[in-house]
Image (cartoon, rainbow, N blue to C red):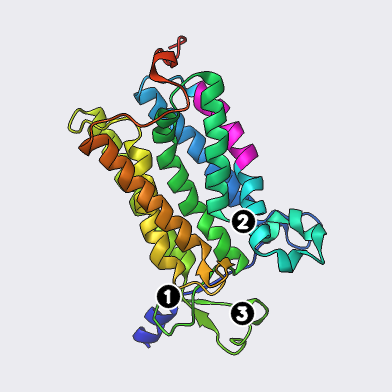
Amino acid sequence: MVSSLLLSAFQFTSPGSELPLFQGTGFSIRWYGLLIASAVLIGVNLSQYLARRRRVDPELIADLAIWLVVAAIPSARLYYVLFQWQEYANHPEQIIAIWKGGIAIHGAILGGLLAALIFSRLKQISFWQLADLVSPSLILGQAIGRWGNFFNSEAFGSPTDLPWRLFIPRDRRPVGFETVEYYHPTFLYESLWNLMVFTLLIVLFLRDLKGKLKLKIGTLFLVYLIAYSSGRLWIEGLRTDSLMLGTLRIAQVISLVEITVGVFGLIWLYKLGRSLPDVVPAALQKTDLSDSNQ
């Protein structure tokens, strides 16, 4: 009896994609949208707090956040749709149905990077400094956002009989696995991994702030690339719905590229002792980024 209760405690079953409070009222709020909105709100406040600790005007972060949201969410959707075009070719009206899921974090990262580069150029400030301040919020947002996959019964792993397992409704199961009920909860694996990466970045930030470390500008973002991508690399191998390019899992390819960039960047900073190339030459960057109202 006890073992049966313990076993069931580790079995995850999605309650559905909509908040129960609004079901049947003609008005619905979906978990996916609520989680994304919460991640953005928490992330902006966290990055503003980190900016204050670095004596950077938090209003810069608020302005940047608008750019990131405007660029990242459409990019995440477009990235997903392009690799799943066969599903949308005959139903183009579904392309904008983001509330049903189907966004790719790598698409969001690419869109966000482009927006941040343009923002840094226009504001004449270091891209790497902003990236360091945003990285902890980004990985925390990813940890929160992964639970959207849980509520939508998507982005799960291969079948499993492990004690921790995710029940998937029949209409959401992969072709050929209609009779299989339980799968790896890859949303949970990645969420927990991302929380560990978040903890690592915050510890590095605080130790640097206290003078126990001497981190160079860009270090936190490079560590983010390596740490997040290392987890995504092995977790993606468990997925049954990976975006593919031929026989290659796109997320694993991108993760390998990000790990390579991160490692090379750290070597560039600490082994070669050079500064990272920036969108604005150091001589032209604004050096006083403090909030004059403080």
Q: CA distance from mark 2 to mark 1?
A: 29 Å
The x, y position of residue 231, in whole percent, is: 38, 60
Label at residue 217: none
Query: Would you say residue 65 sits in the magenta stretch?
Result: yes
Q: Main secondary structure of the magenta part?
A: helix
Give the mark, 2 or 1, whose residue is nearer the N terminus.
1
Q: Which corner quadrant holds the N terminus?
A: bottom left
| Secondary element type, mark 1 | helix
Give the mark, 3 or 1, whose residue is nearer the N terminus.
1
Label at residue 103: 2
Q: Residue at x 53, y 73 (%)?
A: 247
Label at residue 9: 1
Of the pair 65 and 46, the residue shown nearer to us: 65
Q: Which residues are magenta?
A: 59-71
Q: Residues within 10 Å of mark 1 (few under 14, many from 20)?
A: few
Query: Would you say residue 271 sits in the magenta stretch?
Result: no
| Secondary element type, mark 3 | loop
Q: Residues within 10 Å of mark 3 (few under 14, many from 20)?
A: many
Can I make out residue 134 in this image? yes
Q: Amino acid at mark 2?
A: Ile
Q: Residue at x 21, y 30 (%)?
A: 214
Contact (Cβ within 8 Å) of mark 3 with mark 2: no
Contact (Cβ within 8 Å) of mark 3 with mark 1: no
The x, y position of residue 53, in whole percent, is: 35, 25
Of the pair 279 and 206, the residue shown nearer to us: 279
